[in-house]
Image (cartoon, grey):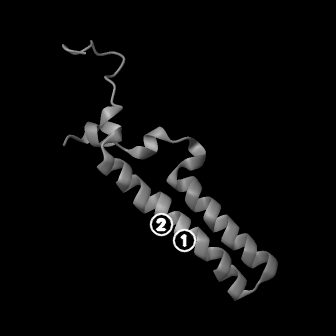
């Protein structure tokens, strides 16, 4: 597989800025940090961290792999605007 093909099959290319890995990580870190700053209670911060870890695991690890395996991105591929249409399109 060529590098350009791999880059275009990145599921994050199809998501808005607020649903990118960096924004998901920053939001989770901010929530955990804020909870610690406000309550300074370990058990409550851990309780808040657990759903965030599940959220991260699903959206940052499992979901992208499921999308790649499904082949849905390959079906949505369109030729670049500057290239002529392919025969049979």
Q: Quadrant of residue 82?
A: top left
Q: Quadrant of residue 16?
A: top right
Marks 1/2 in contact by CB < 8 Å: the verdict is yes
Q: Is residue 25 left or right of residue 72?
A: right
Label 1: state its secondary structure. helix
Label 2: state its secondary structure. helix
27 to 13, vertically: above or below: below
Dot 2, how many residues are within 10 Å of its Cα: few (below 14), some (14-19), or many (20+)? Answer: few
To which residue does mark 2 refer? 57
* Percent coordinates x, y for residue 67 in the rendering: 37, 49
Q: Quadrant of residue 6?
A: top left
* Percent coordinates x, y for residue 21 in the rendering: 51, 54
**Looking at the rendering, in which quadrant would you find the C terminus?**
top left
* Percent coordinates x, y for residue 26 in the rendering: 61, 60
Q: Is residue 81 left or right of residue 39?
A: left
**Looking at the rendering, in which quadrant would you find the N terminus?**
top left
Residue at coordinates 31% horizontally, 23% vertically from top-left?
A: 79
Q: Is residue 14 left or right of residue 77?
A: right
To which residue does mark 1 refer? 53
Q: Is residue 39 left or right of residue 12?
A: right
Residue at coordinates 29% horizontally, 16% vertically from top-left?
A: 83
81 to 33, vertically: above or below: above
Which numbered circle lies on residue 13? Answer: none
32 to 18, vertically: above or below: below
Mark 1–mark 2 Cα distance, whole angstroms, equals 6 Å
* Percent coordinates x, y for residue 69 in the rendering: 30, 50
């Amino acid at each position: 597989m060529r590098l350009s093909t791999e880059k275009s099959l990145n599921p994050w290319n199809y998501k808005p800025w607020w649903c990118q890995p960096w924004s998901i990580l920053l939001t989770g870190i901010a929530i955990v940090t804020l909870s610690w700053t406000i309550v300074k209670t370990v058990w409550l911060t851990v309780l808040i961290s657990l759903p965030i870890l599940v959220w991260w695991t699903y959206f940052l690890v499992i979901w992208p792999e499921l999308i790649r395996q499904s082949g849905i991105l390959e079906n949505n591929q369109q030729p670049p605007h500057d290239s002529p249409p392919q025969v049979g399109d």
